Image: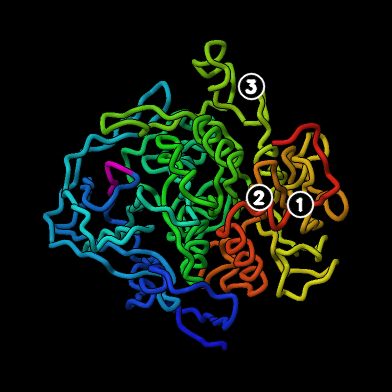
Amino acid sequence: MVGVVALGGFVVRQTTRTSNTAAETWVTRENRRPGTSAWRIATTAYGGVGGYANRVSAQIGEAVTLYVSTAAPVFHVEAFRMGWYQGLGGRLVWRSAEIRGEAQRPATVVKTTRTVTTTWKPSLHVQLSKDWIPGDYLLKLVTSKGQSYIPLTVRNDASRAPLLMMNAVTTWQAYNDWGGHSLYFGPNADPAARSTVVSFDRPYNWAVRQGGYPPVDPQAYEVCCGFVATELGVVTEVERLGLDVAYTTDIDVQEHPAQLLRHRALISGGHDEYWSVAKRNAVEAARDHGVNIMFLGPNAVYWRIRLEPSRLGANRLEVNYRIARDDPMFGKDDAQVTTLWRSPPKARPEGALVGVMYYCFGSDDDGVVADASSWVFDGTGLKNGDHIAKLIEREADHVDPALPAPPGIQKLLHSPVSCLGLGGRRASGPAYFSDTTYYTTKSGSGVFATGAPWNCKLYDGCPSGTSHPDKTVQRITENVMRAFAAGPAGRAHPSHGSDAASSSP
């Protein structure tokens, strides 16, 4: 059955499947509750207020402190849980009283690392009651002068849900240029003035403009690297399907690596670019214990970072020097030196985990089916050589022939792309390819990597790419999610590719 619903002014073609549907879950029941598109902020309404939380995630029963600055006389907070909700994308869970506004003191910039940080006074404490169902939240700050967001993940650390969604908050923070500096640029888009350490003790700039990208809706948080632009579509798909899921962040994975073993699959939802050594070690250990992994975006595990404390707590500062000799850890603990993962002094190319490696940007090309016999294409009707329109948008990964790939890796899609490589050269046709891959391990785990951004193919109204879902991409994603939720995917679906490596992961 096909229905049509509205999503924030856009049209969604919703397909309800009558077979292969799991028993009703708490996710199904939750998404029957009244949804709303009021979580959205119009471009003209963005700004005039900024805020941040003292933690990236919390559990029910815990308190979260919000720090807010605005010249408006009062503000209030609206907490939206993000999901399917009849295609509207969110549900209003809580609304604060009106709170006196205050223009807080200016940020400071640490001269040596160009770290922007604040020492604001707390504005309010939010106690998470049982009404705060675990999931991904946007806390919308509302004033007469404008609006903005504070993202928050609500965890349930006792959950044994088959799927675990991991929010890439360190990547969001890397691109955040609030106060004039990010890990990419300083004022006036000057790369020489970039930060080498960024702080979570500041608001996100959801309207950031960097790197020559065209203007985008502020909800996109740049064109590549925030929750709405890279992860909301994945969350929407999981919850549309009613799959049992828990939520966490990459910082929580670093702090509590054993949590991964309580779940059958870890979902990296989008542009998951910045990884600490502890995070990578935790994910690889889980894979080697039979936990499946989905990478639903390109450019994963690209930059190595480490986390340090700020005045508000542990792991609030994100360190990324990029040049090995600039890092104070160089020659002292080379495994922690914050270069590319594929670079010296302790290279661990990302392909050994992901299967593919970041390759190029600026793409706008079709996906091309390379192995239609794979179970991931069940129900799609696709044949080898068939195209999925405009699947490879902006960035692309590939299996690097110069480096070992996991044994038995399957190239599910092998797509010619025209884009700028890491050396800045543009090529097309057979010179450049994007790969979507799958491999399995001795533990039975399966690792699926799209090699391209799929988030905007999974829901309607995406501000940073295609603005409508692709039913073929939705079906492929559903096939993988359901198989991965059932247990180690390699037992039922061993990979059988021809690209072998010298050793098994």
Q: Is residue 451 visible?
A: no
Q: Residues within 10 Å of mark 1 (few under 14, many from 20)?
A: many
Dots 1, 2 in contact, CB < 8 A: yes
> At numbered mark 1, what does the secondary structure look like: helix, strand or loop?
loop
What residue is shown at x 82% (from left), y 70% (from top)?
Answer: 386
Q: Quadrant of residue 418?
A: bottom right
- Residue placed under numbered mark 1 in the picture: 495
Q: Residues within 10 Å of mark 3 (few under 14, many from 20)?
A: some
From the top left corner, tell me how far across and down residue 298 is, in percent.
Answer: 63, 50
Nearer to us: label 3 or label 1: 1
- Residue placed under numbered mark 3 in the picture: 346
From the top left corner, tell me how far across and down residue 359 is, in percent.
Answer: 72, 44
> At numbered mark 2, what does the secondary structure look like: helix, strand or loop?
strand
Residue projecting furthest to the top: 331
Left or right placement of residue 14 versus residue 473 in this view: left
What residue type is disc 2 on?
Gly
Calculate the distance from the C-alpha at mark 3 to the C-alpha at mark 1: 29 Å
> At numbered mark 3, what does the secondary structure look like: helix, strand or loop?
loop
Q: Is residue 357 above or below residue 20?
A: above
Q: Which residue range is magenta in the image?
A: 51-55
Q: Residues within 10 Å of mark 2 (few under 14, many from 20)?
A: many
Tag 2 or tag 3, which sits nearer the N-term? Answer: 3
- Residue placed under numbered mark 2 in the picture: 446
**Quadrant the N terminus occupies:** bottom right
Left or right placement of residue 482 versus residue 201 in this view: right
